[in-house]
């Protein structure tokens, strides 16, 4: 009789522990996302693309509601002749969870050395709380090609599990 009692107690403890762990994560919820990113531009590694394409990497930080301060990294391919840009980017939260994004938009020279851009960011999953993240945001900003600095404002909606 003892083995049955012990296994019943263990199953009860394991089940209770699992319930407590799942209580820490909220169900997927749509949320507004907004804030500012400050980035540094650098040439992308690897072979140069066929002109007129330009490949660059962007890295820096964003302060985004509701995510807080996150690390931004990613690549962008710009066609200055067509005035288009496409990219794949990631945001990494303080706890290490990664949010993946695709972007597509337009860009144009707005002053000597200054490129203004508007893009649609599509959230496409990630890790941890962002594993099934979805949504879109508008990104608008400018890149100073002389200083290699970019500022960007992001506003939109994102659905993800997130902590309670």
Image: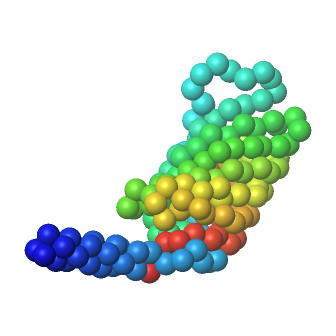
Q: Is residue 122 above or below residue 11?
A: above
> Which residue is most to the left?
2
Residue 137 is drawn in which quadrant?
bottom right
Residue 125 vertical placement versus 73 (above, below): below
Would residue 122 be found to the left or right of residue 21 on screen?
A: right
Q: Which quarter of the rendered picture does the C terminus lie within?
A: bottom left
Asked where in the image residue 41 lies, by quadrant, the reply is: top right
Q: Position of residue 38 (x, y in %)?
A: 55, 56
Residue 24 can be seen, yes or no: no
Using residue 25 as the reference point, say whether residue 8 is left or right of it. Answer: left
Residue farthest toward the top in the current orientation of the protein: 47
Residue 26, given in percent of the width and then of the height, sits at 49, 78
Residue at position x 60%, y 22% from top?
46
In the image: residue 23, left or right of residue 3: right
Q: Residue furthest front?
A: 1
**Residue at image location 87% in from the left, 35% down from the top:** 81
């Amino acid at each position: 009789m003892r083995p049955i009692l012990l296994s019943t107690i263990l199953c009860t403890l394991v089940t209770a522990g699992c319930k407590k762990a799942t209580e820490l994560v909220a169900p997927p919820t749509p949320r507004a996302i907004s804030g500012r990113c400050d980035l540094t531009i650098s040439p992308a590694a690897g072979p140069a693309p066929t002109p007129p394409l330009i490949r660059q990497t962007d890295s820096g930080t964003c302060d985004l509601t509701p995510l807080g301060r996150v690390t931004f990294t990613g690549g962008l391919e710009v066609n200055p002749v067509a005035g288009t840009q496409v990219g794949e980017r990631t945001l990494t939260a303080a706890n290490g969870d990664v949010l993946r994004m695709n972007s597509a938009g337009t860009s144009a020279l707005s002053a000597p050395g200054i490129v203004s851009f508007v893009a649609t960011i599509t959230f496409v999953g990630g890790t941890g709380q962002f594993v099934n993240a979805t949504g879109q945001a508008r990104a608008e900003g400018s890149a100073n090609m002389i200083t290699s600095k970019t500022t960007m404002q992001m506003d939109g909606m994102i659905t993800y599990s997130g902590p309670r």
